[in-house]
Image (tube, rainbow, N blue to C red):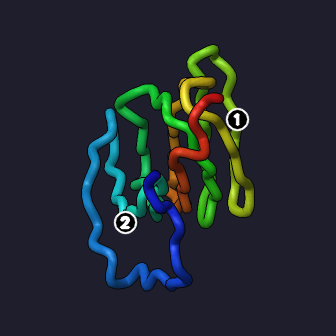
Amino acid sequence: MVNKNIPFQSIDWSNVPKTEHKGETGMAHWQTTQYNGLRIRIVEYSKNYFADHWCEKGHIVQCLEGTFISELKNGEKVTLTKGMTYVVTDGLSSHRSITKEGLKLLIIDGDFLKQK
């Protein structure tokens, strides 16, 4: 059995490097910390960001700054603003992010969001 316990620790995001991820339009910058079965990211989308793929992964997404649309593959569009959160399990709702003005998110995903 793999130990998934995480001892107390703080994350100084100013020391976590950023990686670039191109969208269909715009750019995303990720700062990622990875643990066994858990990933935590600060993600910043540029102005006019439009995701280049449908995401099947489960997430907990907290909007820290800005406004964005989470578009579901079924055509539904949900607008989220600063202070709002969405949660989805792996494989349940294909989704992609769209923003006009840019934004900053905290995204948590991992094994706990797999379908049971």
- The residue drawn where x is 65% and y is 37% is 88
Q: Is residue 27 left or right of residue 81?
A: left
- In this rendering, the answer to whether 80 lies above or below 82 is above
Q: Disc 1 on helix, strand or loop?
A: strand
Residue at the front extreme of this rendering: 1
- The residue drawn where x is 55% and y is 83% is 8
Mark 1: which amino acid?
Val
- The residue drawn where x is 55% and y is 25% is 91
Residue 54 picture quarter:
top left
Percent of width and height locating residue 103: 52, 58
Q: Which mark is residue 86?
A: none
Residue at the top extreme of this rendering: 74
- In this rendering, the answer to whether 1 lies above or below 57 is below
- In this rendering, the answer to whether 1 lies above or below 30 is above
| Mark closer to the chain start, 2 or 1 | 2
- The residue drawn where x is 69% and y is 46% is 86
Q: Disc 2 on helix, strand or loop?
A: strand
Compute the Cα span from label 2 to label 1: 25 Å
Percent of width and height locating residue 29: 34, 59
Residue indicated by mark 2: 31
Image quadrant holding the C terminus, namely: top right
Q: Nearer the viewer, mark 2 or mark 1?
A: 2
Residue at the right extreme of this rendering: 84
Residue 89 picture quarter:
top right
Mark 2: which amino acid?
Gln
Residue 2 picture quarter:
bottom left
Percent of width and height locating residue 75: 63, 17
Q: Is residue 75 left or right of residue 101?
A: right
Local crowd at mark 2 within 10 Å, few (<14), some, or many (≥20)?
some
Q: Is residue 69 left or right of residue 41?
A: right
Residue indicated by mark 1: 78
In terms of depth relative to the viewer, which is nearer, 46 or 85?
85
